[in-house]
Amino acid sequence: MRCADALVELLEKNGVKFIFGHPGEQILPFYDALRTSKVRHVLMRHEQGAAHAADGYARSSGSMGVCLATAGPGALNLTMGVATAYKDSVPMLVITGDVPRKLRGKNVFQDIDTCRVLEPLTLKTFDAKNPEEAVKGLKTAIKMFENGLTGPIHLNLPKDVLEESVNVSSFEELVNEDIKLSIKLQNEKTMDKYISKAIKSIENSQRPLILAGAGVIWADAVSDLRNFAEKNKIPVATTYPGRGALPEDHLLCLGMLGTRGTEASNFAGKNCDVLLALGCRLSERTLHGIGKTKIIHVNTDDDVLRGDLKIHGNVSEFLKAVHDFEIQDTGEWISRIMEHSNEYDIQTDQDDVPLKPQRAIKEIINASEDAIMVNDAGTHTTWVTLLKKVKEPGTLLFSGGFGPMGYGVPAAVGAAFANPDKNVVVVVGDGGFQMTLQELATISQHNLKVVICIVNNSSLGIIKQWQKLHYDGLYEVELENPDFLEIARAYRMDSERVDSPGEAFNAVKRGFKEMPYLIEVIVDTEEGIPLPKVIK
């Protein structure tokens, strides 16, 4: 069996349905194996788009995303998307081709040390020296994901390794081999001791607070969290990536905590006496909303654990273990929190022309109903963050920790393939859209159920606002944009332009009937985002 065929068969056996990629010479044996496989390859128009699409697929489905590129420039074009997934702990398998082994390090065409480039952006990078190492590396990567580790894992495959044969019986042995992972999980006896300490802390607490991160979602612990919170009547705040872990219209959900947190969530974070931090990394933005309190931190990543009680384990297993205890009445504590709003005080009913961006985005959100919403990076990101209620995981996708412009459109491709029965709405700025607009070709080719809303303020809005606030004048932030509707037509996509109150809502509704569809929303060029409030 050819190594390339063995790898594709292993992916197929492990439930991989889609791979997002772009071919090149050094990865062609892998593409030849895909040609006759049930695994479907989605041809992206740029490797950055492939990585973002795999990211969007993972976030919206809860399953591993897979992206594929050739050696040299192909592999390096993936790095933006890989870094985005790494910062947000998104499970992604990154496969790259490489020049043949005898040519590596000889400065030949497209030869570069891809593994060294991707090493700081991945949980693990496997550099296959032979077919057996390639199969074992892939098997180990899959096992790591199955054991709850999240983030990108890289598999590098020289072309000659892909073309070599692997003995069929050896392949079966490798597939059936029990891979031993070097994961530093606390042993059962130590875990029991930590569980007992955690229970005691929660039992003695008068003002407990749960902080739910994206790890709750990746651990498939959403129902466990809800049951735990409801049974013990403990309020829940979320991190930005953890939004939807508890529906934001739930009585116990306080909304997001931290720099852009709600008043209720940040009051609870500043005044709780025990914080149960589940599956989050307690970033500097989240810590902005946390006071001096006892922190019980649960995470599978030992590098991010902090606080008074560090529990290196799976969130789902932890919640199942801490079910049997008596907690003090939290009624008074919850009443104090509810004196503060978990809504953002933002006016969205302006009838002004030019159209206010917050009014336009509120209309887009209202029209989108049960659609998956994909955010990009810019001023519109903050408006969506503040105005959208997230009711279930995987329905608001965004590039949180890294924030690259150009995430939205390709991530929507992945979300659409992962959720063929759902509509996908992209909210993107005129600057970010032009970073990856070539993926309109992918959307059009596959007739995806995607509506793209370009919020056009003719500038790099957030940078323009910072220049106004902190510097002497504007410089290189105003955009002379093309005709976005003509671009849509070039990609065989219907489109329209709106610029008045009420029009964005109706345009999105029309878009759902004509998908794929592009809407250009002309908004006030001078309207900035509100600054975060001081937390007390």
Image (spheres, rainbow, N blue to C red):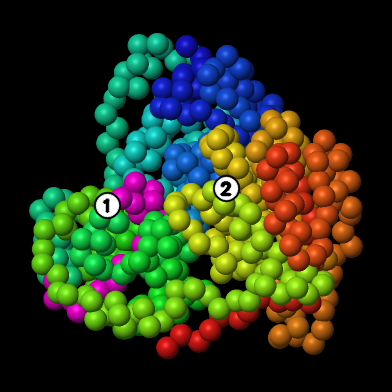
The residue carrying pointer 1 sits among few (fewer than 14), some (14 to 19) or many (20 or more) residues within 10 Å by Cα, namely some
Q: Amino acid at mark 2?
A: Ala
Q: Amino acid at mark 1?
A: Asp
Q: Is residue 68 above or below residue 290?
A: above
Q: Magenta span has 457?
A: no
Residue 300: x %, y % from top left:
32, 53
**Which residue is at 31% across, 42% downward?**
147
Q: Is residue 188 above or below residue 514?
A: below
Residue tagged by mark 2? 371
Number of on-image labels:
2
Viewer-side residue, 338 vs 269: 338
Q: Earlier in the sequence, mark 2 or mark 1?
A: 1
Q: Give me the C-alpha separation between circle 2 and circle 1.
A: 25 Å
Question: Any mark on residue 224, and which?
Answer: 1
Residue 85 can be seen in this image: no
**Magenta stretch?**
203-224
Q: Is residue 26 left or right of residue 422?
A: right
The residue carrying pointer 2 sits among few (fewer than 14), some (14 to 19) or many (20 or more) residues within 10 Å by Cα, namely many
Residues under numbered marks 2 and 1 in contact, where contact means CB atoms less than 8 Å apart? no
